[in-house]
Image: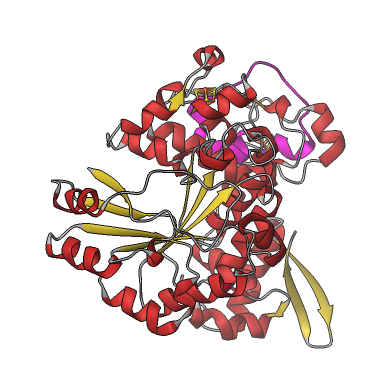
Amino acid sequence: MTIITPLTNICNQHCIYCSSHNRKENSREEIIKSIIAEDNHLIFSGGETTLAKNLFKYLSKAKKKDLFIELQTNGVTSSYFSFAKKLVSSKIDLFNVSFPSFNSETYQKITKTFYYDKCVKGIKNIIGLKGNVRITNVINNLNYKELPDLVRFVKKEFSGLNLLELNFVKGVGLAKNNKEVIPKHKEISKYLVEALRFCLNQEINVIVDHIPLCYLKGFEDLSVDFQKIVNNKDKTFLDEKIKIKKCKDCDIKNFCTGIRKDYYELYKEEVNPVSTIFNIDDISENISKEKDLLKKRFDFFIKYDIPFQLINYPLCIFRSYKKYVKKTKDFKKPNSCNECRYLKECAGIPKKYFEKNGSSEFIAINEKAFLTNREKCILSILNYKNDLTTKEIFSLTSKFNICADCSSSDNSIIVARKLEKKNKLSKKLTKKGYVWSLKK
Ligand code: SF4
Ligand code: SF4
């Protein structure tokens, strides 16, 4: 069980969404009581916890009880290295540091201070001292468009960070009923999904809180509430959430806690029930661009036993999901489809999609579609460095321990030619000989 103990109301910032505004400050007795309670996760919150009188006494008392201690802080005081060192030495298990924006101007507008540099330095100090840091970014009207840039900044500047938490602003404290602070889910969704996509590709450990699953398409598993549901954890958080009438039509409702009550009071109806029937006609953009996210989503449904169906999805791109594909009509099939083993089972390519994007994404499935280890090896080399001569490819084969089979550049040229036939590579004759490139 987790217990949250506010140590102080005093703060050196004045965030526009402060949830502890006018909150009653705990007395010394109440704080001690929370430390000796039979809970194992103690969260010291504020105001700014590092400004609390007796902070270090409370920390040492909690440590003697062997509790998991989480300290919420805005990181400003940790810009003083000696202070950050003292904090880290107190064996705090988790520093939950608020980072409202990577952009100093937005930071200033949100916190009404000029402490941006101090906050960044504070976070770097704690991470540098090997403190376990989770950065919390509260998504609000002033910063949601910056989410993709925020995660790029986090990747670049905070290497060693344990976790990034993107929390939708709660409608409490200063944010209560405040449309200037609280954005609509549908407005932030696009930026959030872009940011999460970056995190996935860059291996940034990230979670999301207080956003219903219908606005997390492809990233449902990153929702804190979802994780609590599937791990059967503490359900007290459910009191803050509500499912509305429309949620009845949602195919993933059993995995969602709904929307925050304070959000519903402010904006009334705003959910987007999820259908797990996917029709190829709904994809207007490039399938190749979307396929990784779609596949991630389908894997999520499979993992959690959520029924889904893919209407007329082409099997060449989604063949691992073949048993979920239903063919209801026949679309256009370019000549290349004639060589495909799925020619009869597959619906082909919708006419409109074909006219807009052509058919280069649809590669007939036959023995040519499968890659040997030698071929995979050459593709990995060209992914590492594109536009190489045959000799250069051969010189890199030992670096990629995939087949370790090529004994001379003659082998490399044979394999590269096969890949050219499979439409994976192109070649250009230069003074240095053939230069091989990956096909876009
Ligand atoms: S429609 Fe309702 S149940 Fe479905 S994801 Fe949205 S909030 Fe959750
Ligand atoms: S190559 Fe053509 S027939 Fe084969 S799976 Fe793709 S779209 Fe369908």
Residue 413 located left or right of residue 243: right
**Vertical relation: 194 (above or below) 249:** below
Pick the quarter of the image with the C terminus.
Answer: bottom right
Query: Within the magenta stretch, is there residue 275?
Result: no
Residue 27: percent from left, percent from top: 27, 50
Residue 109 figure quarter? bottom right
In-front residue for pair 344/52:
52
In-front residue for pair 117/207:
117
Query: Within the magenta stretch, is there residue 316?
Result: yes
**Vertical relation: 176 (above or below) 195:** above
- Whether residue 435 appears in this view of the structure is yes
- Tell me what residue is drawn at x 78 percent, y 88 percent: 432
In-front residue for pair 216/54:
54
- Tell me what residue is drawn at x 53 percent, y 11 percent: 245
Query: Which scheme is used to colour this image of the protein?
Result: secondary structure
Residue 342: percent from left, percent from top: 60, 32
In the displayed orientation, state which residue is furthest to the right.
Answer: 355
- Tell me what residue is drawn at x 53 percent, y 79 percent: 397
In-front residue for pair 141/197:
141
Residue 53 located left or right of residue 142: left
Tally the numbered discs: 0
- Whether residue 401 appears in this view of the structure is no
Q: Magenta stretch? A: 314-339
Residue 342 located left or right of residue 60: right
Pick the quarter of the image with the N terminus.
Answer: top left
Residue 348: percent from left, percent from top: 71, 29
Residue 364 located left or right of residue 321: right
Residue 300: percent from left, percent from top: 45, 37
**Vertical relation: 339 (above or below) 421:** above
